[in-house]
Amino acid sequence: MAVAERTPVIVVEDLTARFGDYTVFEHVSFEVYAGEILVILGGSGCGKSTLMKHMIGLYKPYRGRVLVHGVDVNTRNEAELRRLRQAIGVAFQGGALFGSLTVAENIALPLREFTDLSQEDIDLMVKMKLGLVNLAGFENFLPEELSGGMIKRVGLARALALEPTVVFFDEPSAGLDPITAAELDQLILDINAGMGTTMVVVTHELQSILTIAHRVIMLDKSARGIIAVGDPRELKEHAADPRVLAFFRRQPLSRLTKDA
Amino acid sequence: MSSQSAARSRTDSSGGFSVQATGEPGQAVTFAVSGHIALATLPPLKSRLTSLLNHYQPAALTVDLAGVTYLDSAGALLLVELEEEARARGITFTLAHASEEVQKILGIIDRQALTAPPLKVEEKAGVVEKVGAATLKFVDDLVEVTVFVGDLCLALMYSVLHPRQVRWGEVGFYMRRAGVGALPILGLLSFLLGMVMAFMSSLQLEQFGATLYVSSLVGIAMVQELGPLLTAILVAGRSGSAFAAEIGTMMVNEEVDAITVMGFDPIKFLAVPKVLASMLVVPLLAVYATFFGILGGLLIGVSLLDITMYSYILETRKAIALFDIISSLVKSAVFAVIIAGLGCQRGFRVRGGAEAVGAQTTAAVVAGIFLIIVVDSLFAVALHYIR
């Protein structure tokens, strides 16, 4: 990626998340650039998912703001908000498919609600999206008839239904076997390369991070914020912070600090 | 990275498109498509291309994409569709000046997927098949209910024989939830019911100068019928539904599986405390409701009908026999078993997800109220002969 041409798609400004008296993170600022795959990583409880929920507008920030395409995700302008929501796709951890609808109906739902496409065109779009996630032919299955990996892929197809420019992934490879997880990683890479979709991925699966991330930001619970930004392969070798090294080398923090 | 991908990432989907056709009808024709080709512009662009295609009927079609500033996968799908359409009509089709970005998007569209037949075809059942399926389901349902009733009876009997093995803490918890929680609403409802009954009946009895009998009318009605019935219906709505939803959600979350695997019997573990709690608390609630109903009648009698409090209470006491009170307690306990048992049974039947929890919760309340009224009528007949 040429640095000179980076266009920020998402801007997080001085974001502070607080539940009651508990501050999850504070003064977090960073940008996500067009076409990149940014991975938000960190240990359990560091606020990765909280950060993502702020970025998609599910949580209101205690302080600071998040702009997607220059629009505040907590805007009160209905028209802006609607456009924003259609520019964002979210692939939830457990798929979040509607259990009473078939795969095709799940994917068609946003198309039916937000576009003027005819039923015929919607059917074709659904087939196209299913092809995109390698699930051609699964239209009439109910979510309960699918495996975990398939559910995640249908969730991704639904997230892509309205041709979003940004897609968020919450733990895409969590709970999947290595082969299925690798397939999902490849899918993320293919879609990013093919459609130039900007992607924000929350995960702590080391293998996935090294495979898919163009850039990572690492959160830390004790620091209550970002402790590292950069290329994961570089961080793995040259990070100065022992917490970052411990994460990438998959070692207990105590051992690393003792060695140092 | 070219400027195109930057443009593609823009959220602005209002950008327009244009199509310029050059060439002679029936010959080689070029459609120069330019602008923003995206999901939002799909329907107008599609109809424009189709009408151009019909108008020119070309022998060879070239689609020039030099002017395309934005293309998403929906737009790419349209180009693929156009190509398929052209091919079907025997037109030679070529894409010209497709940028690298455009080619990439076209590349990710899996053409075989577009025509792949569904792996599972929904079969439309005929009337006979539907009736048959419904009958079989009803029989299954009946078998399941019977099995559950048997299991529950065995579990209850076991609990009576081994009272130490009952989870009394849970029983207390559900007694509070189903009993204490229902006190305010039940008290208010039965008080108002007593008042209304006294007032309405006094209008009729006044014509015969028999307003004193309002007290025995309200008393008998509340003790024999309305107290237990109102209580049962209220508990079915408040607690029967809660039991079904609670166990149903546990089914969905595999908690019931965990209970089974740990070596507990789900019926003893989950259903028995709820049923026992209801059996203990619903008769008490019925007494409470009856008391408040009579109190409501008393208020009307004393304030509007010139009956003294002493004579109202005396008349009420004369009208109510001990037999009535005991039979109403027994009846309430039976209602309690129906409400709690049905709630639990419906909960255990939940398969799938959120929708099934809702459906079974509804079923628990509806079937519960239905059965309460059926059993109440049976009691009315039976008690008449026993008396």
Image (cartoon, coloured by chain):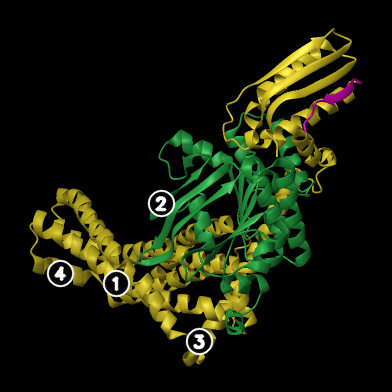
Give the label, 1 or 3, closer to the camera. Answer: 3
Image position of A207 (left or right of A200) = right
The disc at residue B287 is 1
- The dot on residue B313 is 4
Residue holding disc 2: A64
Q: Are marks 4 and 2 in contact (CB under 8 Å)?
A: no
Label 4, label 2: how many angstroms apart (C-alpha)? Answer: 70 Å
| Badges 2 and 1, same chain | no
Looking at the picture, tell me which residue is in the foreground, A93 or A230: A230
Q: Which residues are magenta?
A: B90-99
What secondary structure is marked by label 1?
A: helix
What is the chain identity of the residue bearing mark 4?
Answer: B
**Place of residue A103 in the rendered image (x, y in percent of width and height, measured from the top left):** 69, 48
- Determine whether the residue tagged by mark 3 lies in a helix, strand or loop: helix
Residue type of the residue flagged with mark 3: Ser
Label 1 packing within 10 angstroms: few (<14), some (14-19), many (20+): many
Q: Is residue A57 visible?
A: no
Category of crowding for the residue at label 4, using alpha-carbon neighbours closer than 10 angstroms: few (below 14), some (14–19), many (at least 20): some
In whole angstroms, how far apart are the C-alphas of marks 3 and 4? Answer: 41 Å
Q: Is residue B98 magenta?
A: yes
Work out whether B13 lies above or below B318: above
Asked whether the residues under the numbered discs 2 and 3 touch, taking CB atoms below 8 Å apart as contact, a structural biologist would say no
Question: Please, which chain is the residue tagged with disc 2 on?
Answer: A
Q: CA distance from mark 2 to mark 1?
A: 59 Å
Q: Nearer the viewer, mark 2 or mark 3?
A: 2
Q: Which residue is mark 3?
A: B159
Which residue does the image show at 57% across and 27% down from the upper left?
B14
Of labels 3 and 4, earlier in sequence is: 3
Name the image quarter holding residue B311. Answer: bottom left
Chain ID for green: A
Q: To which chain does the residue with label 1 belong?
A: B
